[in-house]
Amino acid sequence: MTYSETPQLQPITPAYHLRILSDEQLGQFKSATLEILQEAGIYCPSERALQIYASHGAQVDFNTKLVKIPADVVLHVLAQAPRGYTMGARSPAHDLHLNGTSFFCATDGCGVEVVDLITRERRPSHKEDIAQTARLADALPTIGFYWPVVSAQDFPRTAPLQELEAAFTNTVKHIQSETVMGAKMADYAVEMAQVIAGDIASLRTRPPLSLLVCCISPLAQDHDGLESALTFAEAGLPVGFMSMVSCGSTAPSTLAGTLAQGDAEIVSALVLIQMAHPGAPVFHSLMPGIMHPHSGAFLTTAWEGELLYGVGVELAHQWGVPTLAGVYGTDAPAPGWQAAEESATALMLCVLAGAETGSGMGLLDTCTLLYPEQLVLDSDIYQRVRFDAQGLDTSPSGLALDIIKGVGPRGQFLRHRHTRDNLRRRAYSDLTGQATPAGDLRDPLEVAREKAEGILKHHRPEPLPESKRKELKRILSEAEKEFG
């Protein structure tokens, strides 16, 4: 079998930035978070976590499982968190260096249904869908790292580990899980990551796996989520926490109140990790929604809602940690105008706010439904933002004054070498502006489906060595015995 080389990553490296919040507003949010954690507290159902909080200066009620963290403790502990680090990959060329200069994007995750690329049937997702989307992600230079996009519902007991095996086997890029929950499941996942890394030292310096854990709004943590996060952090694998507070239902009905509560939920968990493992790589992810007042639905995008994701980036950075920004999340039920409109603005805002990473490519219908071609469509949006964020070349070559003067009034630029050289450097969408033999323009949705089909037919990433494949299968077999 012929294998394809995974293309070089194309991160977004903005030449300019924006500020959404003033210094005064940032200070107000920091004070609000500290006040919430000190006076309202956070519910923590993990006995292991409660003991850690208590031994590091927090006020813990072991009966109610309520934790209140003094402001000075929060500030002291979070000062130990690293501002940047490396998220490794199977291929060193695809490592992600979170140093504040570039933005890397991931697929979305945890979808439960798929519109099959060939049959167009809508059906529950399974492990093979993860393998296919991992290959799609491997072939697209816009995708920096991979979340298992959908759930391996054909392996209900060990789905998170089956998802990791399918991902590690089908892409050389970094893998981030949001489904490995519980200490035992995390132990297996860490063992799989060590197989990929090769040794314990490499596991810590170039971790090929990271974890995202969701908080439970309002002001609570998940037992199994904390247990898995502590296990990952002990092994040196990056761990992040996400709040998906919903304005008006699980959070106040004001945007600022929603942000303050969500930030407090995340910070309480980041503090726990730094208490247990000072200096452990962590990240902050604030992805709030807005409740629809008529249906009660969680809207990932609303006219006011997209600004919240960029603010989340700024809140993460004021705590001195990287962020996983909310980008691409859409309520659209199918590819089309709504999906594109709801993705582009949030992506641009978060990139220009300085986000290190973001996720959300590929899923529709409030992050539940996979159209494989949506990964291709989202990649086109990514490229538009990437070029816009690069800024404008105003060097002598860019201004081309010599060329303008040389051609002069009523002259001709088409025959000039400068024109030919620069036209060859231009980048154009390979989805829009595609002509049929009759000269009509093709539907970009049809072109995207064709491109996705072509990738799945021809792209095969560098394979895992057979010894590592066997080790992953062995770990899965042991997990199946324990959990099955």
Image (tube, rainbow, N blue to C red):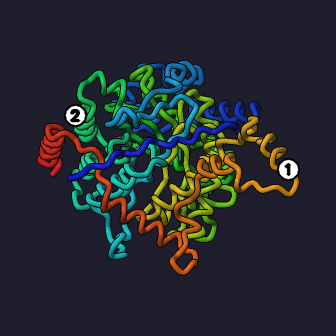
* Residue labelled with disc 2: 195
Residue assigned mark 1: 408
State which mark lies toward you, 2 or 1: 1
Is residue 19 visible in the rendered structure shown here?
no
- Which secondary structure lies at badge 2? helix
Q: Residue at x 78, y 44 (%)?
A: 403
User: On the image, which quarter does residue 175 sit in?
Assistant: top left
Residue at (24, 25) in percent of width and height:
199
Q: Residue 152: x and y, percent? A: 28, 57
The x, y position of residue 57, in whole percent, is: 48, 20
Q: Is residue 318 above or below residue 148?
A: above
Q: Is residue 159 left or right of residue 315?
A: left
Q: Number of marks in the image?
A: 2
Looking at the picture, does residue 351 appear above or below residue 194?
below
Report x, y in % for residue 8: 44, 41
Q: Nearer the viewer, residue 307 or 120?
A: 120
Q: Which numbered circle lies on residue 397?
A: none
- Amino acid on which disc 1 is placed: Gly
Residue at the image point whose x is 39% and y is 59% from the top: 111
Q: Residue at x 42, y 64 (%)?
A: 451
The numbered mark, 2 or 1, whose residue comes first in the sequence reads 2
